[in-house]
Amino acid sequence: MTGKQTWAIPEGYIPEESTGPEPEMISHESLCVLNTADEDATLEITVYFTDREPVGPYEKTVPAERTEHFRFNEFEDPEEIPKGEPFASVLESDVPVVCQHTRLDSRQAENALLSTIAHPGE
């Protein structure tokens, strides 16, 4: 198995505006997770804000030996993540996984894509 069970993404921001065709070019934050284990990974994601209590856990599953991309824009339960507000997140998994963070910022026609590996926990 590859990865860790805890990952932190200290940077998050969903732009309020988008340019281009939907749904491909909607500004968004993504959590990309690789599960190389031979069993499904059950994830719990907690989201932190600068001015209020954390929200979560958001529960997600990544099937065995698969990858999944989850858009923070589509997180709904226990509540939607607000656009235009900074946030951070912590992912906890019951099996080791690898986690990456990606943002598509399409507020302008000249789109920007940012991607970085998350910080693994101990």
Image (tube, grey):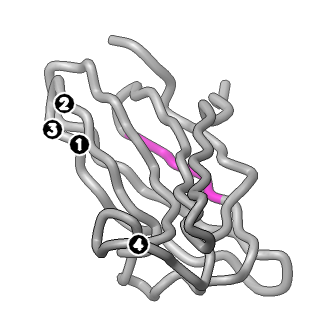
Label 4 – label 2 distance at C-alpha: 30 Å
**Residue designated by label 3:** 63
Query: Which dot marks residue 20?
Result: 4
Please name the amino acid that badge 4 sits on: Gly
48 left or right of 65?
right
Q: Quadrant of residue 17?
A: bottom right
Earlier residue among tags 3 and 4: 4
Where residue 114 appears, x then y in whole percent? 62, 44
Query: Which dot marks residue 62?
Result: 1
Mark 3 near mark 1, Cβ–Cβ under 8 Å?
Answer: yes
Residue 84, placed above or below residue 88 = below
Q: Residue at x 46, y 54 (%)?
A: 30
Earlier residue among tags 1 and 4: 4
| Labels 1, 4: front one | 4
Residue located farthest toward the right when viewing the structure as drawn: 51
Residue 53, placed above or below residue 30 = below
Please name the amino acid that badge 1 sits on: Val
**Residue designated by label 2:** 66
Label 3 – label 4 distance at C-alpha: 32 Å
Please name the amino acid that badge 3 sits on: Pro
**Label 1 crowd bin: few (<14), some (14–19), many (20+), radius 10 Å:** many
